[in-house]
Amino acid sequence: MSDSILAIDFGTSNSLVGAYHNGKTVAALPLDPKANDPTLMRTLLYFPNPDLCYYGVEAIDQYIEQDMEGRLFRSFKSHLPNQNYLGTVLDNRILTLESMVGIFLLELKKRAEKALDTSVERAVIGRPARYSMDAVADGFALHRMEKAAQWAGFKEVQFVPEPLAAAFDYRRQIDKEKIVLIGDFGGGTSDFTLIKLRPEGFDKKDVLAIDGCPLAGDALDSLFMSNKLNEHFGAKSRYRLPLSSNVLTMPLGVSQKLNHPAHIVHLKEKDTYEFIREVRKCTITGKDKTAIDRLFILLEDQQIFPFFERIEKTKRDLSQQDQTVFDFNYPGLETTEDFKSSQFVEWAQDTRTRIFEALDRCLESAGLRSDQVDLVCLTGGTAKVPFIQKELQDRFGQQRLQTQSHFHSVLGGLVESAAFWGKGQKVVD
């Protein structure tokens, strides 16, 4: 058994792996030969049947090639703090969330071991500052990650906050001590670390504060569904149960799953699916019934993934222009809607407030004002959303903002954390 340590950035949307190997750091290992960037693997699982699984770009390719049969899972990391979500069922076989995450971590481990030509039993794995604002749920999520890492075959694991890892990566760029705020805006969480950085050396006391919230890119994507698009798929459909005069609307539990890219796939689970079929039988108008028929096409023809990919493109378009057209042309699901950036800003007000409340808590916990921060280092795609950028500019000034490599900054810090561990020093207790 080697002394190598893997550094795993297990992300909501994308994952990367580096290593501390033979006394040296390895920045990023090739994981997905089909990806534009082979070091970057989409966090996707595709099961055409319970006995076979595909990952990354191949998951998408096989999903399309096999006529979108089976189950494609994305953003499953976001379920970790949800104590009510135990997993799913594949053809009467139970697939727990821990084993779902473990299956993906095991594949990362196998591909990394192949690249290093050695087996590895230790790993540094990134974690959000907070999986949940609830302390119990946050602890539950970390416990699940520990179980998943054991499932994947790791004997020892150290979990390092992702914004702290990004801070380590940024340290390479400074030549004197600075107080730095790291803002890591990913798919599932927005995380902040205030740290005293210097070119060499590290002491745990240098970490002044860490905070965050479980809202980021996926939460912003879901706004397009919840505010406009979901009515095309029965979220507002009305129905009347037999022998009742009460007019009901599609239950909130169904529409909430419909709105979120990580949750919508679970509308296909038997009890929920059968309930929606019963609602369809009891709809009041033809329009209500048609909307639910469209939902069945979305689910049965496996159009969830491409539909949400189109939503994500709409979000990116609105980061560069004042308005755009959402246009989805699959037969039976034809949907065209105009969106304005001003609408997006309005819909995102609560999400933006909660993200920056986490930043304010971080500053308060460190006993610092915004003008005492020397540099602000931003990572993650959501950091590029204009209203996020503007809020940061208003607080810190444009001259103090710096944007790091979108995907590799957290990994760089995790690799450095693995090197600390390999030399006998742990970054966190």
Image (cartoon, rainbow, N blue to C red):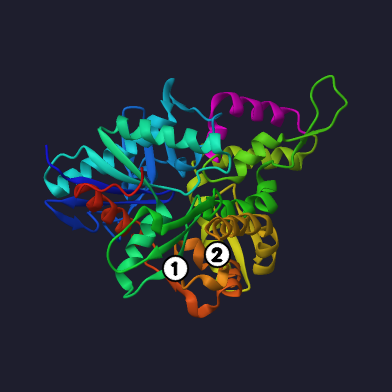
In the rendered image, residue 164, in percent from the top left (x then y), is placed at: 40, 56
Horizontally, residue 122 falls left or right of residue 357, namely left
The residue under label 2 is 368
Q: Is residue 223 above or below residue 140?
A: below
The quarter of the rendered structure image containing the N terminus is top left
Tell me which label, 2 or 1, sits earlier in the chain: 1
Q: Amino acid at mark 1?
A: Ile
Horizontal side of residue 347 vs 208, given as left or right: right
The one of 206 and 92 positioned closer to us in this rendering: 206
- Which segment is the magenta one? 264-283
At a point 30% along the width and 39% down the height, the residue shown is 157
**Residue 154 location, x and y as percent?**
26, 35
Q: Residues at badges 2 and 1 in contact (C-beta under 8 Å)?
A: yes
How many neighbours does mark 2 have within 10 angstroms: few (below 14), some (14-19), or many (20 or more)? some
Type of amino acid under label 2: Leu
The numbered disc on residue 179 is 1
Residue 398 point in image, percent of width and height: 52, 78
Say if residue 132 shows up in the picture.
Answer: yes
Distance from Cα at disc 2 to Cα at disc 1: 10 Å
- Secondary structure under tag 2 reads loop
Is 407 situated above or below 70?
below
The verdict on residue 135 being magenta is: no
| Quadrant including the C terminus | top left
Judge by depth and name the residue closer to the eye, 350 or 162.
Answer: 162
